[in-house]
Structure formats: C-alpha cells, structure tokens
Image (tube, grey):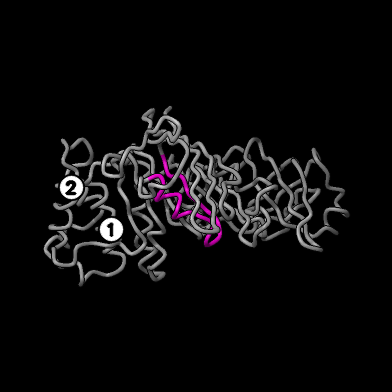
Amino acid sequence: MSDIDAHLVLRRGEFVLDATFQTPARGITALFGPSGCGKSTLLHCIAGLEPAVRGTLRVNDELWQDSELHVFVPAHRRRVGYVFQDAGMLAHLSVRGNLEYGMRRARRARSGPAFAQTVEWAGIGPLLGRRVQGLSGGERSRVAMACALLTDPVMLLMDEPLAALDARSRAEMLPYLERLHSELSIPVLYVSHAIDEVARLADHLISLEPGRVVACGALREMLTRLDLPFARSDEAAAILDAVVTGYDEQFQLALLAFPGGRLAIPQRRLPAGTAVRVRILARDVSLSLAHHHDTSILNIFPARVLDITEDRPAQAVVRLDAAGAVFLARVTRRSVHSLGLKPDAEIYAQIKSVALLR
C-alpha cells in the first residue's frame, strides 16, 4: 500500500513546526492536538501553500517536495481538495455554479466521482439552484465538500469542517463524512479538536503537541496507549469493531459480537451481519474478580490486565485485553490494590454503557 511520508519543517516567527509522520494513503487520518499546535499549518504545508517549508513529502509514490533535491511541486499541481472551516465559496454564484467552477479549475479528465454522483453523495440536489448566502451551516459544509471532490483530487484535506456548526447541523453532517470510508479511495487528512468526532470518523491518528508530532498510528492502538494523553483524559475510550448477530425483540436490544464476547445495547433493529464501530468509555468500565449475575450490568466478559498507570492522585487507568480487543478501565488506586491488579491478572470487565458510532 502507498503511504503519505512526510518530514516538514516550517519556521514562522517564534513558532517552529517540525513534523515527521507516515500514514496510509487511504482512509481518514485525523490530526489531533491542542489549539495552536500546528494542525492547520501542517495541512497548509501538505497543500503546498507554505513555500518557506523545508523537508520532504511523498504521496502515493510521487515526490511532492525534497528541499535537498530542490523539488517543490506547486499547490495547483498537487491535486489537493481543501475544505476549510469557514466553507468559503463564491457568493455571486449559485450552488451549481460553485460546483461547476471547481470542475473547471481541475482542468483535467474526470477520473473521480461524476457530477451527479457527487451531488447525490452530498445530498445537495435540491440546493443546486440556490445562492450560497441562503444556505444553512450544514448545507454550506456539504456543498464545500462536493466542490472539493469535483476538483478530482488525489487527497482531501479537511480543516475542522464541523467546528462552526451548531449541534444539530453537526449531527446532520456526520453521516455524510462517514461515507468517506466506503466511497472514496483517496486519503483524507482531517483536523479536529473533538475526540468524539475523531473516534467516530477516523481510521488513523496523528497526535500533535505544539510544533511536533508525538505519535501516529491506527486509531484503536493510539487511543489505548497509556503513554499518550488520550488514555488519561476525561473522555478516555476504546474503539471496538463488532458485528450484529441478532435482536432481542422483548427488550429492544441489539446483539453484537466482538472478539472478546457479546454486547447487548439499546438500539433499533440492525440487519444481522452489519459491521459496526462501538465506543466504550474508560469511566464506564468496572472490574471484578468474579462473574456476577445479580447485577443490572448486561455486558460482562473475561479480560486480562495488560498494564496499569496511575492517573491523578486517587485514580488509575487499567489497559485490558479481551481475546485481542483492547480497552481501558478507569478505577481508583484503592481498587487496584484491593483487587490485586497487576499485569497478566485475569479479571471480569463490566461495561455499564456502550455507544454505537456507526
């Protein structure tokens, strides 16, 4: 598989971005970190919008930049689709006019989604004749995505496309973003500061601190690494892949199978065999030495302790393995002591709540 391979250095006043990473050239890679750490600047460097950047960048086996070889492919030749936070469009044109303008800018034979397919994918058919000034935030974001795709890009860059939306518009937009997994074969670099958004959408994760990449890898592995800040945050969670196996008609519960066992969650009926992604918050996992049946908790399965790290004065985060599915539990240090928890200890995980992401 081709990769995106980058080592980029940019000095801007007192701020220095020195970012090295490698990520697959397919799927959604989230760039996550605190405000001001360089996420948007890194996107600009990849797009070719920062001529002062030094280093190397290779995408799909194409060399886009190598400072030592004096190679710098200009922005207009990088075939990058860019979706900005403000969903900027040409106000004097209709939605159709903005889409056609993007296609004309591409100036190449169309090998990506056709116009009609892109319009259908973004759900903007009824909007084609409208002026962009009258669009809602969610509608503007969907039109901006369609414009970017119609330039026939080899990479899509998205800079916090949901940040300016209210909760309702954000919820309406997420299903369209989820389609990027199944309907696009190009890589998507997605900037966000919302970990729940990253957990729902991303396949890979690049973690940034001010001016540098601290780690990159598959989303599931990154979220459960105890040496990274995700596992110690209030929203610490694990992402598991599961498959729908049935439905409990009497109690309206979807039944899901994953490598470590079975989950039952309140959910509408889903077709058997449907692949889903679930999120389990560390604070919703309790631990026991025995399998209790006299409890309201439905989801209980055996697990093995991988490692433990202290977190805050009274708490600890326990990393667990259930037949290859890795997840976290946040418990008190007293519980670690009283249960005798240590690496390789056998334990029962009790999952109080499970969120179905997609």
What type is the residue that disc 1 sits on? Arg
Q: Is residue 88 left or right of residue 174?
A: left
Figure check: 311 above or below 261 = below
What type is the residue that disc 2 sits on? Arg
Q: Is residue 43 magenta?
A: yes
Mark seen at residue 204:
none
- Read off the residue under disc 1: 142
Which is nearer the eye, 23 or 313?
23
Question: In x, y percent, where is residue 13?
Answer: 51, 58
Figure check: 348 above or below 132 = above
Q: Residue at x 35, y 62 (%)?
A: 172
Which is nearer the eye, 220 or 259?
220
Q: Residue at x 79, y 54 (%)?
A: 310
Question: In x, y percent, where is residue 250?
Answer: 50, 57
Q: How many marks?
A: 2
Figure check: 13 above or below 271 = below
- Read off the residue under disc 2: 105
Q: Residue at x 35, y 49 (%)?
A: 49
Q: Is residue 245 left or right of residue 229?
A: left
> Badge 2: how crowded within 10 Å, few (<14), some, or many (20+)?
few
> Badge 1: how crowded within 10 Å, few (<14), some, or many (20+)?
many
- Tag 2–tag 1 contact (CB < 8 Å): no
Q: Is residue 337 magenta?
A: no
- Range of magenta residues: 27-46
How far apart, in angstroms, are the residues tagged by discs 2 and 1?
Answer: 19 Å
Question: In x, y percent, where is residue 45?
Answer: 41, 47
**SS assignment at label 2:** helix
Q: Can I make out residue 215 in this image? A: yes
**SS assignment at label 1:** helix
Which is nearer the eye, 264 or 153?
153
Q: Is residue 65 left or right of residue 142?
A: right
Mark 2 vs mark 1: which is more N-terminal? 2
